[in-house]
Each structure stands twice: as C-alpha cells, then as structure tokens.
Amino acid sequence: MKDIIFSSIAVDLKNAAENSDHPFRYFTLATSDFNNIPRLRTVVLRNVDDDLNMMVYTDERSKKISNIQANNRVSLLFLDQQRLLQISIRAKAEIITDHQVIHKIWEQIPEKSKKDYTTELSPGKEIKNPEDVDYLEGKHFFSAIKITPIRIEYLRLKRPIHTRVIFKKELGEWKGTYLVP
C-alpha cells in the first residue's frame, strides 16, 4: 500500500508540472528570512524529474532567492481540496547558476510569460499604481530553483480511515512509515 501511495504522489507531481489545471500546479513554498521568520508564497510547479526533483521559476531579485542563499532548507505544501489530499515536503533548494541551463529554460518560456522577469524594479518594491510597472528591453532577471525532496508526507482524509504516511530517502530509496493522522 505504501508503494502505491508513493507512486501516486510521483504521478500527481509530474502531472501537475504538465497540466495547469492540476490542483498541485500552484503550491506554497516556505523559506526563512535572515531573522528566521517564515516566508510563504505561492509558486508554480514547472518541472518534476524521475527523482522527484522539482523546478520553479523566479526573478533573481526576489526575496526567495536571498532567503535560499541564507538557508537552503525549504518546505512545500500541496493541497487538493477535492480529494482532501495534502502533500507536505521538506527539501533543499538550489539556485541554478549555470548560464547555459538558464538560457535553455529561458528559450522555452512563452514570449508573453517572459515579460514577468523583465521589470525595471525588483519584486516587492512599492509603486503608486499597478500600471506604473516599467519593463526593460533586451534584459531579464530570470532564475530557476531546483528543489530536492528530503522528506515527503502524505495525508488523505477519507472516511472511515484517514491515511498519513511519511517517506524518507534512505540509501537512495524512499521508505514509508504510517503515522497517526
């Protein structure tokens, strides 16, 4: 049963990266700032590989970048309200610094989406009006973050029996243990 659950997690995550309508497509990413204050934000799941490493995109000037540079331990929360399913992941985040990799990803981004990474001011800066955002020509601040899971927790609320399982990677293999929900 635990193997089936783990396989279902992998399928859901991979499907979410490919399908914008999947409930896991948008998830909560938690980091800590320099004062160890938790910072939460919704991000978009862009890619999941066979080892369940995940990729998100961001502006290189965003707070999440400086948070990850200070402390690369992050938490992720995925929620499917229809199935009453929650996936919580503890992970390590790595900012992709290889310019060739960044360039390859950048070339695959739709033109209309590239604009999000070309604002003159960095994310979070105050402006008087949403129409006051200026964009740069020929320059971008695109970055990507690789997220490597360390621990994955599955919680499914379903009567008569709720199911909670924690998976930890041991010697390259994911091992599951049931928990009281």
Image (cartoon, rainbow, N blue to C red):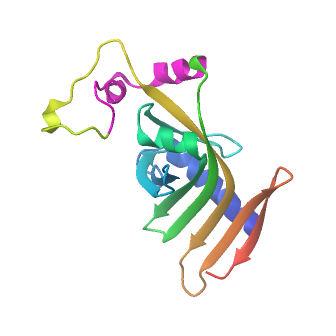
Determine whether 94 is above or below 153 in the image. Answer: above
Asked whether residue 116 is drawn in magenta, I would say: yes
Determine whether 139 is above or below 36 in the image. Answer: above
Determine whether 70 is above or below 104 in the image. Answer: below
The residue sitting at 51% across, 56% down in the picture is: 36
The residue sitting at 53% across, 77% down in the picture is: 157
In terms of image quadrants, where is residue 3? Answer: bottom right
Asked whether residue 7 is drawn in magenta, I would say: no
Q: Is residue 90 left or right of residue 106?
A: right
The residue sitting at 44% across, 26% down in the picture is: 142
The residues colored magenta run 100-123
Where does residue 139 sit, x and y in percent of width and height?
37, 15
Most extreme residue toward the right is 171
Where does residue 91 sit, x and y in percent of width and height?
63, 51
Front-lying residue, 108 or 160 = 108
In terms of image quadrants, where is residue 141? Answer: top left
Q: Is residue 19 left or right of residue 179?
A: left
Main secondary structure type of the part rendered in magenta: helix
